[in-house]
Image (tube, rainbow, N blue to C red):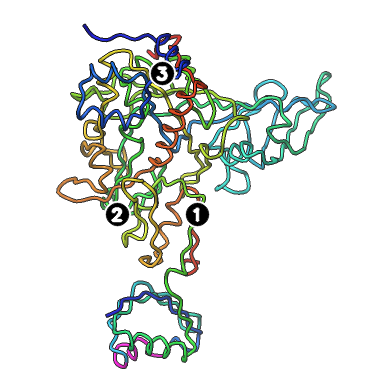
Amino acid sequence: MGIKKTYEEINEKIKKGKAVILTAEDVTKMALEKSPAEIARSVDVITTATFGPMCSSGIFINFGHPDPPVRMEKIMLNQVPAYAGIAAVDAYMGATAESVTDIKYGGAHVIEALIKGEKVELQAWGKGTDCYPGKEDIRYIDKGSVNEIFMFNPRNAYQNYSVAVNRSDSVKYTYMGVLLPRLGNAMYSTSGELSPLLNDPDLRTIGIGTRIFLGGTQGYVTWNGTQFNPEVGKNQHGIPINNAATIAVIGDLKKMSSAYIKAAYFEKYGVSLFVGIGIPIPLLDEEIAARVSVSNRQIETTIFDYGSSGKPQLGITNYEDLQSGSIHLNGKKIRTAPLSSIKIAREIARVLKGQISSGEFLISKPVQQLIK
Amino acid sequence: MYTRRYVLTFPPDKVNEPLTFHLIKDYNMEINILKADINAGKEGKLLLEFRTGKTDMEKGLKYLKDKGIEVTPVSKQISLRYEDCVHCGACTAVCFTDALTMEKPSWELNFKPEKCIVCGLCLKACPLNLFKMEFYN
């Protein structure tokens, strides 16, 4: 008879301070000695995390009405254009939007400044209407002076990601970092066995409504992320071996910490945003226990040549090799480097574990599965 | 034997003197030129690796300074705002002298400026723009 636990039972244990919580790395170590059945029996929740550049991120912001009111049709924050085509004083600032004066500064920097509580210059213009007679609103705002700021990221926490190399004869500057010519290096993202969606490859527990750690506060999964692709081929361990599922997430920027949200600029590519996400996975049964025990060796991913048009596929590798510092491709040893911070991902997994242990963070059953 | 890396900055009127010849001949130095930026009539910079005995190293460096050459240890050429580093590892992809490596198992960035050859690639690789370099500019 396999073990079965419900979300309610696990939350009762959390509230009583009796739940056993491990990080995804810890449970992988435990699995060297224990069977999935034993793990499912002895562990209640594992915490997963990632901290990497996620371009498809941004914030909704409502500035509050100035006097006289302005129907804000064009908006800039610290010289970075925001999307103003929603209502009078609502806007969306995407992380990758670039300043009109400095291409190394963008929406991500505005987002980080707002989290830190810094003042940001708002410039807004409207044509003037009977109900919004004002034509201009220029002032400094901060997170305390505006109505709402919530982060809404259309595509985060990719379930696996390509390894980028460059076979051409020139340096390629990409969102995967600086790719040196003639297979000079290989860049990888995702935190491997610690990465959220790789620990729940069939998305049994991560779905719409799942409560998550987002940028230092509690947020939620709202939908499947854009470019969500459940059709990617899986290996014998059930792991999709290329970019697969994604999640759209939401959370209150006013409660976030700049330790877990950082602006970035990639040379000759542009601005992006490091986003810290942690997701708890309840061990409801043996099958989930087996999934969360996945190790870096079992997580394979695909190598692509970002230096050639069409990004041809060159081979398959795994995270144990990637994290060792070098991989072999076509008989050549290639230096590897990560793009996402394992150190900060581990910190998030530990912080989330602490929040669940203390009862301030309860697990939640998805309202609906992420099936496209 | 000692191995040290220095950046030599010399004024325009010294550019035409055969300094490296004297370092090799008079102070028994093995010299590896790692980077050079020399233009006639302008200030020049050389990044050199010296290998020689302790006494010759001291005498050779004194010879350069007496000639009006500014001698800076290479570790002073590069700086990193380490307190702001998120330890993503992107800079380690381009550092072939291993001045920048990921420490295992902590996955913290390990920064050894004395191994740097001032190539400048980390300036472009760091997504947080945390490196600064004298020679590079």
Residue carrying label 1: B130
Q: Quadrant of the C terminus of chain A?
A: top left
Numbered label attached to residue A11: none
Question: Is label 1 on the same chain as label 3?
Answer: no
Amino acid type, residue under disc 3 in the picture: Lys
x and y, in percent, of residue B44 in the image = 46, 79
Q: Which residue is pictured at 32% across the width and 62% down the height?
A: B97
Which residue has dot 2 on it?
Answer: A169
Q: Quadrant of residue A309?
A: top left
Judging from the image, what secondary structure is the residue with disc 2 in? loop
Q: Main secondary structure of the magenta part?
A: helix
- Of badges 3 and 2, the one in the foreground is 3
Where does the magenta region start and end?
B16-26
Above/below status of A169 relative to B41? above
Residue A33: where, in percent of width, then height? Answer: 19, 28
Residue A241 location (% of width, % of height)? 26, 29
Question: Residue visible at 48% across and 62% down?
Answer: B79
Q: What is the chain letter for disc 1?
A: B
Instruction: Please give the residue where the numbered disc 3 appears in the rendered image.
Output: A18
Mark 1 Cα shell of 10 Å, populated few (<14), some (14-19), many (≥20): some
- Looking at the image, is mark 1 or mark 3 nearer the viewer? 3
